[in-house]
Amino acid sequence: MDHQPNLPGVLSSTSRFYYVDESGDPVLFNAKGKIIVGNGGCSRHFLMGLLSVFNPQSLEQELVALHQALLANPKFASIPSFQAARGKTFFGFHAKDDLPEVRKMVFELLVRNASNFRFFAVVKDKIQALSYALQQKQVYPRYRYNENQLYDHLVYRLFETRVVKSRRHDVYFARRGPADRTEALRRALANIQTRFGQSVKDNRLLGTIRVMPPANPFTCINLQAVDYCLWALQRFYARGEEEYLRMLWPSVSMVHEIDSKTGKKRGETYAKEKHPFGVLSATGNIGSD
């Protein structure tokens, strides 16, 4: 479970607790260098989401209570995903693996907690990432695409306006792969602050950042909530399904499409009263994730 410091003022306006995960993948090529973007098993879009939770203990406790109640319910005892050997819902919530009935209950929990969190996301069209990689290959024959570069780029775009205010920020990243990239993520966020610091005269505007070692969502419980938010957003981009994203929209502060083109401006941001519902199907931006 999350281990938030039990200190006076930890839930005050001067503190922020961020939970970060991804949806889709940064893969463009297979092991033989063949382009596989948009093929079965390789997403068209790569999403990164951040959940800013005002009272992390409260959200965690509700998720744990729901999970324990489901495990104790004999109705689910024989369901494979509730078996320890499967490593799925038995250990925690994961939208892709959970039963539709379970998924519905988790979304209802998130809707009830809508005032306790805000969701931010950036969306990368991997066709555009592929185009850039191929251009680089033409200019620099020794160029090799590195998936971490795309991941780190989205980290920057997601945090570029989040960690520059005079607050303390505790950041929990979901673990991805066997490599520990904690230091790389710390450097990435520190670079954002450095760039911002060069543009202001008063360094007191800069906050403090603590990047926790990347965690498993089954132990860092609130990562399960951002997984659900990302699942809803990914279903919207992949299939045009709006139901779950509409449920969460009151808690959505920003969805930024990095590669969309609106007139002379590159990129589109949706938030609050401005939303993408109906836009993607009209513009043909839905991909086969």
Image (cartoon, rainbow, N blue to C red):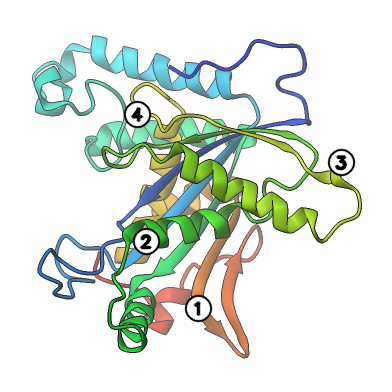
Q: Nearer the viewer, mark 2 or mark 3?
A: 3
Callout 1 touching callout 3 (CB < 8 Å): no
| Of residues 8 and 282, the one drawn nearer to the viewer in this rendering | 8
Which residue is drawn at the image coordinates 76% and 35% (left, top)?
167
Q: Residue furthest right?
A: 201
Instruction: For mark 2, give the secondary structure.
Output: strand
Which residue is drawn at the image coordinates 40% and 17% (left, top)?
64
Q: Disc 4 to disc 1, how far (Cα)? A: 32 Å
Residue 242 in sight: no
Q: Nearer the viewer, mark 4 or mark 3?
A: 3
Disc on the earlier residue, 4 or 1: 4
Disc on the earlier residue, 2 or 1: 2
Residue highlighted by disc 2: 46
Q: Residues within 10 Å of mark 1 (few under 14, many from 20)?
A: some
Amino acid at dot 2: Phe
Q: Position of residue 152 (x, y in %)?
A: 46, 56
| Of residues 75 and 254, the one drawn nearer to the viewer in this rendering | 254
Q: Disc 4 to disc 3, how far (Cα)? A: 34 Å
Q: Quadrant of residue 151?
A: bottom left
Instruction: For mark 3, give the secondary structure.
Output: helix
Q: Which mark is residue 216?
A: 4
Amino acid at dot 3: Arg
Residue highlighted by disc 3: 204
Q: Position of residue 89 (x, y in %)?
A: 23, 26
Residue highlighted by disc 1: 260
